[in-house]
Amino acid sequence: MPVSRANALALALGAVFLAAPVLAEQPGKPLVLTSPNAESAQKPEAPTELPAAAPAQPAAHAEFPGGPAKPGPRFEVEELKAPDPDAVGVLDEAQGGLGMAMWHGTPAALVRKVLPSLPAAAGSRAVHSLTRRLLLSAATAPEGNRGQSPSLLELRAERLFAMGEVDGLSSLLKAAPGALASPGLSRLKVDTWLLAGDAKAACAEAPVMAQGGPLDPRLSVFCQISAGKTLEAGMALDMMRERKDADHAFIVAAEAMGGTPPAKLDKLPNPTPLHLAAFKAAKLPLPADTVANAPPSMLHAIADNPAMAADLRITAAERAEALGILDTDSLRKLMTGVSLTPAEQQAAGTQGDKSPRGRAMWLRAVGAEAAPAVRAELIARILASATERRAFSATARLYAPLIADLKPAPDLVAAAPMMARALYAAARPEAAGNWLSLAKTDPAGAKLAAGLWPLARLTRVGLDPSPGDSFAGWAETALSDERRAVVTMAMLQAVGEPVPASALLAHAAGSSTAPGPKPAMKALLRASAEGTRRAETVLLASAALGETGLESIDPDTLNRVVVFLRQAGFEREARELATEAVLANGG
């Protein structure tokens, strides 16, 4: 009866969606979307799990020359160094920072060479989070950095901007000492504050930016209108319209900011932070192609624009959440809070989860479903469909609270394997274990549960040694898929799980064609981990993985990164990466 009810619900989405509570947006009051790390300065992140400390070494004793003591104290005069402004940061160790001494032993030449190559769109949320913490940490600059240009702060700021970490970057730039002022840093300040919605700060920085070259007349117009100087802005707009290379998109937004009815605009192929700020201030939707072409730096601002169409806001928010820029709760609130007309609801109902509106309506429908068996069946279907879209982990995080409301019970056994896998993906291993136990009570579910054994080992630290038949049970379900098998075994080995040689031998022949870093990068990464140079290890690990997706990167590279992160003291983060990799490859 529950399953047939789920079928009826899936076939008649419109009726259920119309019955589900809809949280309409309030005009003029945009929903606040937050970064997963927006409150890190107030709420400390969970500390990194460190390996057992090595035995303390006896302190070195000062050696004094023999003979009778000479009268009076002896002094060594050292030149006092001014504080290094590049040490500025907004995260200390209690807030997830890597520590003031994180660059100890790392030469500035290495940092300045590798840092600009850090990925803007890492294929792992765990790596994105680690990289963010690295770049926002307050820390003494590496040896040899003093006097270098551009400043280390500017290099850090540029990468944070590219990663879309606008909130953290905004705080960092406001804490930056004046000694580090530069045209490049000033441009980053203006763009960051425009995206953060702080027009006042952006316009206050504009005169400083003008010292490095001519000021963009569009920025002048934006600031004039924002300050109520519409007459001056109108004169400048008249001049802009006469140019052959006029920016029509900006002109439309600026006119609307000044109260002129906007002209129709269909395309904006190369959006800038100024475009996004002007369109939001004018309460205008951006053209549809903006989302498709938007870099990570702009996704949060697009999702936060209440004038945008619901499907475009959701698309931008989903991309931002997948990258780790936006927290999952904000995505969930957006999807359950956007207003949809009856016609949009009907259209979305026929598209299922293939459209952003359809995914929003499924989420509402499941939340409104009170019968546990029906809810479990619907979630299982949604997760199966998400797997086909290569969006399983993101969907699992989205539905995790709704799964958590369900209690594992015999009448839900058919959905138990899928519930367990989703909870592992959502970093809820204890709850996942309860569903895994339920799945093992059913013959069909037990076989599927065997395929989840690696996730149980990767997500739980300190488990007793696993019985030998556990690996064999998993191998029966996975070894036929070479990519899945090789990546999973590489991740198990990386966290210290034994893998039989016979299983490795089955996939030993041939050569790998998967993308990966150069041998020199691997050698540098190994040396940094062996030297326990924590920041350097994170820097090189992030650069080694790059923007290649976990579903296609070289398994050996994944193995090395997980091993070396653990060796450098990042046990929790390494296991998160390993879990992401297994899930991304069908595990």
Image (tube, helix red, strand yellow):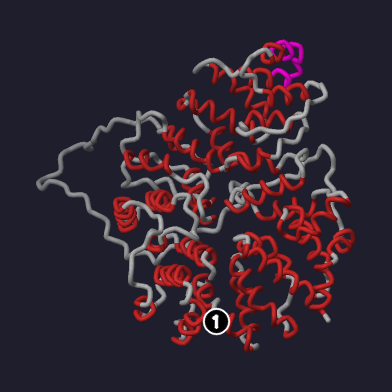
User: Which secondary structure is most common in the magenta stretch?
Assistant: helix
Magenta range: 224-236
Question: In the shown orientation, is residue 298 left or right of residue 481?
Answer: right
Q: Tell me, yes or no, whether the highlighted magenta stretch contains residue 258.
A: no
Residue 532 position by quadrant: bottom left
Residue that mark 1 sits on: 450
Q: Quadrant of the N terminus?
A: bottom right
Q: Nearer the viewer, residue 466 or 118?
A: 118
Residue at coordinates 41% horizontally, 63% vertically from top-left?
Answer: 555
Q: Tell me, yes or no, whether the highlighted magenta stretch contains residue 234.
A: yes
The amino acid on which the numbered mark 1 sits, given as a three-letter code, is Ala
Question: In the shown orientation, is residue 465 left or right of residue 225?
Answer: left
Residue at coordinates 70% horizontally, 71% vertically from top-left?
Answer: 380
Mark 1: secondary structure: helix
Q: Is residue 564 visible?
A: no
Residue 143 position by quadrant: top left
Q: Nearer the viewer, residue 391 or 184?
A: 391
Residue at coordinates 74% horizontally, 73% vertically from top-left?
Answer: 376
Q: Nearer the viewer, residue 412 or 43?
A: 412
The percent coordinates of residue 474 (x first, y second) are: 50, 80
